[in-house]
Amino acid sequence: KQAYVKDLMQHQVDDGLIMAKEKVQLLSQVTERLETISKEIADAEKNKQAKKVEKLKSAKEKATTRKDKLSNLSPKPPPPLKHHAEIFQLRSELKPLLELEEGAKGRLLSVKETQSLARKDEILDEIASFEEKSRGWFEEDDIFQSRIDACNAAWASQSKSSKKGPKKAAPTSGAGSSKTSAWVTASTARPKSAVAKNTASQNKKTGGKGASGVFAAMMMDSDSD
């Protein structure tokens, strides 16, 4: 099993699939290995152990090649969390609740708002649960935290880009004024035919006399007296 795992690790390094911290660790290991081999070569040469010196020099050459390869590798970003899709969905549900909580500072919450915010703690617990389920075997705390930070940064970027959308054009003053004018005209203006009809009806009721005719009749009654 150890040989199998070691072989897989070697292939991972050869393929360049290492993160920044792993690169630092591997470079530190190979540097220490080179220092140890150099001391062993010096001791072997002092003791005139030609075969051992030859063997150690071969090992040193391999270690030097490995160090050069590691130095030239570009570290890969941490792999995404296994349940990042579920975490993103929960954060989408959490976002309006956080905005509601922020906007409600300094005032009393309604019953509906209080019920909505009760879901906030449940969502946070579910996010923490999915994060823990995404943790690898024997994964160190700092590496795991870097993967969580990368997941949060990806969500923040996605959330920010989703805010940017096509803005609706504001109505022009002409369109607004025409709409208002139409409303006023419909409620206040009266057709000429209706005015003429009402005028004729009033004249008929008064015997075809307007205000001046009524005044003249009163004057005639006054003269007759």
Image (cartoon, rainbow, N blue to C red):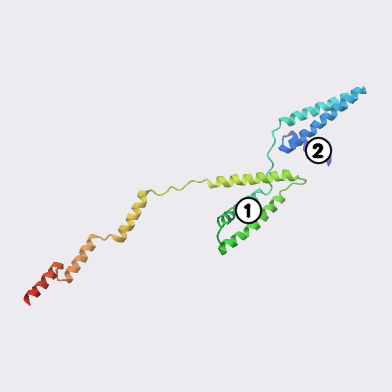
Tell me if 143 is positioned left or right of 191 in this view.
right
Tell me if 5 is positioned left or right of 197 in this view.
right
Residue 6: give its label: 2
Instruction: State the separation of the CA atoms marked 1 and 2.
Output: 38 Å
Q: Which of marks 1 and 2 is nearer the N terminus?
A: 2
Residue on which disc 1 sits: 90
Instruction: State the image coordinates of residue 11 (x, y, percent, origin top left).
Output: 76, 36
Instruction: State the image coordinates of residue 149 (x, y, percent, origin top left).
Output: 67, 45
Q: In this view, does 119 lie above or below 133?
A: below
Residue ID at (11%, 70%): 216
Q: Nearer the viewer, residue 61 or 110?
A: 110
Quarter that holds the N terminus: top right
Q: Which amino acid does label 1 sit on?
A: Leu
Quadrant assignment, res 102 = bottom right
Tell me if 169 is positioned left or right of 73 in this view.
left
Judged from the image, the secondary structure of the residue bearing numbered disc 1 is helix
